[in-house]
Amino acid sequence: MGNSYVNHTVRGATPEAVAKLLKGRTAVIAATENDCVVVFDSECDTEDQSLITELGEKLSSELNASVLAVLNHDDDMLWYQLFENGKVTDEYDSMPGYFDEDSDHSGALGGDAKKLSTAFAVKDEVGIARILKSDKYAAAVERHAALCEALNLPEFAAGCGYRDIDSGELPDGLDETDLVKIG
């Protein structure tokens, strides 16, 4: 069985503002130096896409920030939604129909390199587009790691969710002192 996780990367909000907004939830946040805060939410770790969307909308609208919500299921499928001003402005699915037995799972759907690069203030649209469309990634976590690097997001966002942190399995680059636990 492969890696499964969910997290939200918020660009343009302080860790304090994110923590305040998450009051009443069970979550962990980690701040980074690139104007990003990564949210690991226990409820979203159930992989319910409607819950992931709901939290992404809330974070984006109430913090006036760009948010990249990511779901990696069993290292087979990478799905993300980009939120700006509380609205989904981009969505990507590396294996559409993954949960549908009748699907042929052919080709990734969505993924707008220009919107991603603009939201995270990077210039390599061509490189981002290659990552989204490439068939060279054996595992979804590898594609996510490449996206994190291209978007200048924290390396630890790829491969880590609430369950990992809650069980004490911290990825490289993340220390217990970097975390704020909520709930």
Image (tube, rainbow, N blue to C red):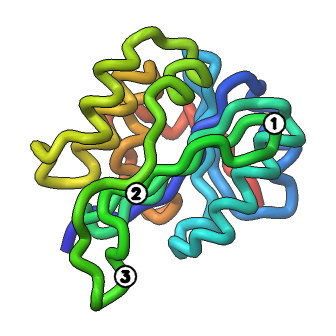
In the depicted view, which residue is nearer to us: 178 or 119? Answer: 119
Reading the image, the residue beneath label 3 is 99
Residue at 72% x, 22% y is 12
- Along the polypeptide, which appears first: circle 1 or circle 3? 1
Q: Position of residue 97 (x, y in %)?
A: 36, 75
Judge from the rendering whether residue 111 lies leftward or rightward of residue 65; answer left or right.
left
Specify whether 171 is left or right of 57.
left
Mark 3 touches mark 2? (CB < 8 Å)? no
> In whole angstroms, how far apart are the C-alphas of marks 3 and 2?
12 Å
The total of numbered circles placed on residues is 3
Neighbor class of circle 3 (other Cα within 10 Å; few <14, some 14-19, many 20+) is: few
Give the amino acid type for the residue marked by disc 3 in the picture.
Answer: Phe
Q: Report helix, strand or loop for mark 3.
A: loop
Q: Residue at x 47, y 65 (%)?
A: 163
Residue wearing tag 2? 93
Q: Nearer the viewer, residue 105 or 147?
A: 105
Circle 1 packing at 10 Å, graded few (<14), some (14-19), many (20+), is some
Q: Nearer the viewer, residue 67 or 117?
A: 117
- Asked whether residue 39 is in view, the answer is yes
